[in-house]
Amino acid sequence: RGYTPAPVNRFCYELGVTRNDNVQPLGKLETCIREELDDAADRRFAVLDPLPITITNHPGTPLPVHCPLHPKYLERGNRTVNLTPTVYVERGDFREVDDKSFFGLAPSKTVRLLFGYNITCTGVRRDEAGNVVSVEAIFDAESLGTKPPKGTLHWASTEFVRGEVRVYDKLFTVEIPGKRDGAGGSAGEASSGA
């Protein structure tokens, strides 16, 4: 349910014809669907586990950032996202201790907000338990359109719509449902974010 005919037909074509019973990995069907959606769907940002970043040197008025509707098909046009004094990134894109293999935000580290400006972490705010509740950063007003640093993060401004996103995983926990005892349960979680 919810699959368009083209990726299902492509999946069947890629399976071919055989006389033997076999089980195909679900990932093969998901790949066919992903490839169709890659060309058809315009891109948007979503932050599921938001960590607020306060940009301390922000001028106060929203700064427009032009994002392509699709990175491969620039002829589709742009949409404008405003860089506001507070933005949100995924909590997993921030670490207090940096290492060479991490391309996210860390203290004194510079990253690019996707299609936007470079920001540098200048401080961290914690709650009574010592958990990070927000980050302070400065932005480089001259960095728009320049070569980005290694880390580029998707983000959300305070103007984004809040919503509930249901992230589902595989329906069954075994490769062939019904073959073993217990057919597995559904695996999913709900997330609220900006």
Image (tube, rainbow, N blue to C red):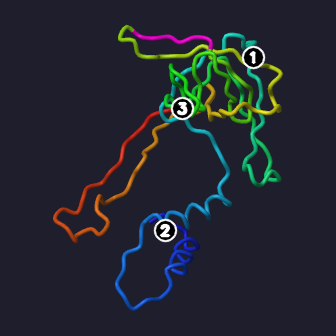
Disc 2 residue type?
Leu
Disc 3 residue type?
Ala
Q: Is residue 46 magenta?
A: no
Task: Give the quarter of the figure containing the N terminus.
Answer: bottom left
Q: In the rendered structure, which segment of residues is drawn in magenta?
A: 122-127
Tell me which residue sits at (60%, 13%) in the image: 136
- Say which label, 1 or 3, has the lower sequence index: 1
CA gap, disc 3 and disc 2: 30 Å
| Residue 146, position as x, y percentages in the image | 82, 31
Count neighbours of disc 2 (C-alpha within 10 A) and say few if under 14, some if 14 to 19, many if 20 or more: some
- Disc 1 or disc 2, which is closer to the eye? 2
Callout 3 secondary element: loop
Callout 2 secondary element: helix
| Residue 34, position as x, y percentages in the image | 57, 60
Relative to 1, say whether 188 is above or below: above
Q: Which mark is residue 29?
A: 2
The residue lying furthest to the top in this view is 128
Callout 1 secondary element: loop
Count neighbours of disc 3 (C-alpha within 10 A) and say few if under 14, some if 14 to 19, many if 20 or more: many
Relative to 167, 103 lies left or right = right
- Disc 3 or disc 2, which is closer to the eye? 2
Q: Which mark is residue 194?
A: 3
Between 160 and 59, which is closer to the camera in this rendering? Answer: 59
- Say which label, 1 or 2, has the lower sequence index: 2
| Chief secondary structure of the magenta portion | strand
Between 133 and 108, which is closer to the camera in this rendering? Answer: 108
| Residue 2, position as x, y percentages in the image | 48, 63
Which residue carries the number 1 mark?
61
| Residue 182, position as x, y percentages in the image | 18, 62
Disc 1 residue type?
Thr
